[in-house]
Image (spheres, rainbow, N blue to C red):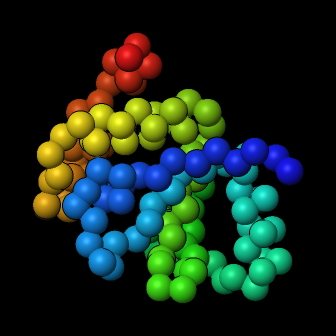
């Protein structure tokens, strides 16, 4: 079987996770079909939010027991590495309670050249 690479990101990676927080994982676009085949083969339903449907490769959700898993699709290896770098940098910061501030920081302060040079 093909090796699947994934990154746990979001509050379960860098906090603060709450009991109702989604488990956010980033996977490469090239791995999506393997994941979808597995979920379909085990009768696990997927769904998308309106925001996910707006993006070309927007990802999807599925639930296992009481855990809601948010699959984020990295369109290529560079995008995957960018997610990994941003997540690692966020882990070095104190947990940010405000969700909007956390998203803003994740999306704005990282320079791709800085990430790949570390």
**Quadrant of the image containing the C terminus:** top left
Q: Is residue 113 visible?
A: no
Give the vertical position of 51 relative to 73 (above or below). Answer: below
> Measured from the top left, where is residue 98 in percent x and y?
13, 61
Q: Is 35 displayed left or right of 21 in the figure?
A: right
Residue at coordinates 82% horizontally, 77% vertically from top-left? 41
> Measured from the top left, where is residue 10 in percent x and y?
35, 56
Give the vertical position of 27 relative to 93 (above or below). Answer: below
> Measured from the top left, where is residue 104 in percent x and y?
22, 48
Q: Residue furthest right?
A: 1
- The picture quadrant where one finds residue 109 is top left
Q: Is residue 84 visible?
A: yes
Q: Is 62 displayed left or right of 4 in the figure?
A: left
Q: Is 85 displayed left or right of 20 in the figure?
A: right
Instruction: Choose between 2 and 26: the one closer to the eye.
Output: 2
Residue at coordinates 58% horizontally, 48% vertically from top-left? 6
Residue at coordinates 36% horizontally, 37% vertically from top-left? 88
Give the vertical position of 27 relative to 17 (above or below). Answer: above
Residue at coordinates 41% horizontally, 33% vertically from top-left? 85
Give the vertical position of 90 relative to 116 (above or below). Answer: below
> Measured from the top left, where is residue 4 in percent x and y?
70, 48
């Amino acid at each position: 079987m093909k090796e699947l690479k994934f990154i746990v990101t979001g509050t379960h990676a860098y906090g603060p996770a709450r009991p109702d927080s989604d488990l956010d994982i980033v996977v490469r676009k090239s791995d999506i079909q393997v994941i979808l085949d597995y979920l379909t083969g085990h009768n696990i339903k997927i769904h998308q939010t309106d925001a996910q449907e707006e993006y070309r490769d927007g990802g999807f959700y599925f639930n296992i027991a009481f855990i809601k898993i948010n699959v984020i699709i990295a369109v290529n290896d560079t995008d995957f590495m960018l997610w990994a770098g941003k997540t690692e940098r966020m882990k070095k910061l104190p947990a940010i309670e405000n969700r909007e501030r956390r998203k803003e920081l994740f999306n704005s302060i990282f320079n791709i050249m800085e990430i790949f040079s570390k």
